[in-house]
Image (cartoon, rainbow, N blue to C red):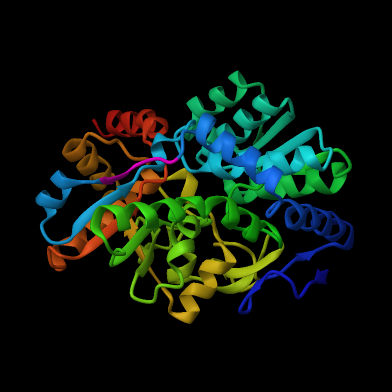
Amino acid sequence: MAKTQKGYFGEFGGSYVPPELQTVMDKIEDAFETYKDDPEFNRELDYYLRQYVGRPNPLYFAEKLTHKLGGAKIYLKREELNHTGAHKINNAIGQALIAKRMGKTRIIAETGAGQHGVATATACALFDLECVIYMGEHDTHRQALNVFRMEILGAKVVAVNHGDGSMKEAIDEALEDLAQNYENTFYLLGSAVGPHPYPSIVKHFQAIISKEAREQILQAEGRLPDAVLACVGGGSNAIGAFANFMDDPFVRLIGVEPAGLGLETGKHAAPLAAGKPGVIHGFRCYVMEDENGEPLPTHSISAGLDYPGVGPEHSYLKDSGRAEYVSVTDQEALDAFYLLSRTEGIIPALESAHAVAYVSKLAPTLSPDEILIINISGRGDKDVKQIFDMNHKLA
């Protein structure tokens, strides 16, 4: 396995892939470096983000939630208002534009909750690209409506039924496909994970979240927030929400992992809380693994957070102390899902509800002159059927 010195965050990141796949990664990196600062590319990207995705989206003062919880003022970065209902479209449009410039005609992607799959299928429909989405079989059942949305948009959805049938296996299959079909295929990776340059690419396209939020909070409050919070699975929405606050040492960066049924049960997906450094999917990060270095099964009520690893930059931010990482249980996330829905009339994705859940504990401990921003990374339409079915089973 080749190990490059590029793409490291401290000891984390890198590219641990076979030589033939490393050649593919090098070409993707070259294209990214060529276009990320190219004025024409950025004009086109900006056009689609504004006119198609609907950016900038609001930074909303959640006055009723603030009053209900007591303590700190709470603002919501409204990524759920984007076209397709989540932050994933920011990155999907950006990478699809790179793929077109590279002359690729076929896009592959992995998806957990299905939001990245829908965003990728949307970008492929827009730019006339063939689209294949790999999704764990377990997730296809939890997110059946998102599977249908992808198919409506013209994508082929491949259910991966080995292992846990979750996001890990979907990424395995996508990397295998890329190794076999790289001449015409571009892997549009959705989270801030994978071999270099993917974590840097995803951060670049998701940093628009904190770029806008920083400008918006300065306009609203005349100062920066005391903390920015986001859920963390692979870590794309969180790294985007943190990016433009990293150089502001007095802004706390708080990532919220899924504790599932409780860290003590082992049925969770919180590698930063309960994992150790290791290699998964071609990069080094905190990972949940057994004594043989094999990834452990994961569990979360939220399909989009159900991953045994985490982005390498999050791993570095944990070790360096720049960011804090906490975890909340399935039940706490579900309670927060209802809390935000009934307090503000905003139904959040179960992923985003994890961040809301932690704020519901944190905000009351702070003073009214402190300010928190929660990244509401997606809307909960996709989760309504899952929760409906859960309630029916309980009944």
Q: In this view, does 268 lie to the left or right of 134?
A: left
Q: Which residue is rendered at x = 82% and y = 43% of the image?
A: 102
Q: Is residue 112 visible?
A: no
| Secondary structure, magenta segment, majority class | loop
Of the pair 131 and 299, the residue shown nearer to us: 131
Which of the 4 image quadrants contains residue 42?
top right
Q: Can residue 290 be seen in this view?
A: yes
Q: Which residue is rendered at x = 78% and y = 72% of the image?
A: 4
Residue 11 coordinates in the image, percent (x, y) = 63, 79
Residue 272 coordinates in the image, percent (x, y) = 47, 69
Magenta part of the protein: which range? 56-60
Of the pair 298 and 306, the residue shown nearer to us: 306
Which quadrant would the C terminus be assigned to in this image? top left
Residue 108 coordinates in the image, percent (x, y) = 72, 38
Does the stretch in magenta take in 323?
no
Check the image and name the residue furthest to the top. 152
Residue 91 coordinates in the image, percent (x, y) = 59, 45
Q: Is residue 97 left or right of residue 207?
A: right
Q: How many labels does the image show?
A: 0
Of the pair 372 and 15, the residue shown nearer to us: 372
The answer to whether 29 is drawn above or below residue 80 in the figure is below
Which of the 4 image quadrants contains residue 110?
top right
